[in-house]
Image: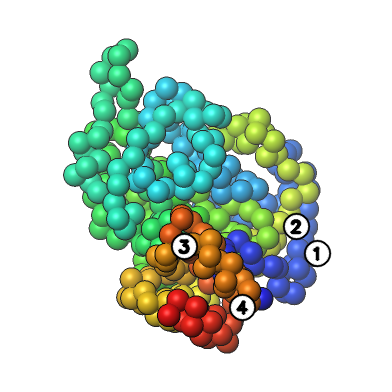
Amino acid sequence: MIDLRSDTLTKPSRGMRAAMADAEVGDDVYGEDPTVTALEARVAAMFGKEAAVFTPTGSMANVLAVGALVAPGQEVLCESRAHIVRAELGAHGALTGITSRTWVHPDGQVDLPTIREMYAPDMGMYFVRTTAVSVENTHNFAGGAVLPLADLKALRAWADEVGIAVHLDGARIWNAHVATGTPLVEYGAIADTMAVCLSKGLGAPIGSLMLGTTEAVAAARVRRKRLGGGMRQVGVLAAAGHYALDNNIDRMTEDHANARLIAEACGVDPASVPTNIVVVDVPSAPEVVAAAAEQGVKLGAVGPRRVRLLTHLDVTHDDAVNAAEILARLLR
């Protein structure tokens, strides 16, 4: 079975498992796990941020990050299909008491003119105040779209003008980095807080990090504990993160090439597939998903007439070729 439902399906390699087995550990709630501490410092430095905190999931990292910028009763602006409003089960409202408004862009991009119009300054006790904008790079439900650095810099400049913050949901920022060659530190420079994931294209079994200032991360550690995210000898997971960063970033070019190969077979312009996500419009998503599974390819339905597939390090070039042939016949 060729499983293209998500890049979260990757399994730890032998080398990663060996690194996990050999990890030096301690109690991370006490701040005594050296492998976690080193990972947090490493990732923070990669993006030019002051500090980072390890979390079990990207959703928790986003909740901690946005919660550091937006107080209860205030709002964050984001694109309509952003993960924080579509795929985190309302966590930001339910857990931190914030509200959100969204702009719509067919490719999930930053729409600065619309954002400017939506922005609500502090107008006293009658109106909700905008205190942050969140952007997602790459954009999951926009087919792995990459947000141009120039647009992100323009957003940062405007946010500084009006005095609001920027959060970058970088669950797949590694894919954006590989696709464009943009240094990670340049992505870090546009955001006050970030969330980055180790368990998607990088292939670790668990783990994300929330990045920001020393003060924001210290407060996030308290909120992480409240949410049940304080973990003990978690160096075994951090070791997987170190291994992933050492070995699995540059190889993402293979995932991107495999995605374009499959996209072309599905009638999608390969030029519209910058990273590892392919979205295909079909007459009936449930029927296509079921038919593909019968022929050995697992896809995900992301709407009644839309399917999504993701390539990753457990999908070889031969797997991609086979999946392309099967899907080409199925969608003919």
Q: Tag 4 or tag 3, which sits nearer the N-term?
A: 3
Disc 1: CA contacts within 10 A as few (<14), some (14-19) or many (>=20): some
Tag 1, which secondary structure?
Answer: helix
Q: CA distance from mark 1 to mark 4?
A: 37 Å
- Mark whose residue sits in front, 3 or 1: 3
Q: Position of residue 173 (x, y in %)?
A: 45, 59
2 and 1 marks in contact (CB < 8 Å): yes
Q: CA distance from mark 2 to mark 4?
A: 37 Å
Tag 2, which secondary structure?
Answer: helix
- Mark whose residue sits in front, 2 or 3: 3
In front: 69, or 79?
79
Q: CA distance from mark 3 to mark 1?
A: 45 Å
Q: Tag 1 or tag 2, which sits nearer the N-term?
A: 1
What residue does disc 1 label?
Answer: 21
Q: Amino acid at mark 3?
A: Ser
Q: CA distance from mark 2 to mark 1?
A: 7 Å
Q: Tag 3 or tag 2, which sits nearer the N-term?
A: 2
Tag 4, which secondary structure?
Answer: loop
In front: 84, or 307?
307
What residue does disc 4 label?
Answer: 295
In front: 144, or 53?
144
Q: Amino acid at mark 2?
A: Val
Q: Position of residue 4 (x, y in %)?
A: 57, 69
Q: Amino acid at mark 1?
A: Ala
Q: CA distance from mark 3 to mark 4?
A: 17 Å
Disc 2: CA contacts within 10 A as few (<14), some (14-19) or many (>=20): many
Q: In which quadrant is the C terminus drawn?
A: bottom left
Tag 3, which secondary structure?
Answer: loop
What residue does disc 3 label?
Answer: 284
- Mark whose residue sits in front, 2 or 4: 4
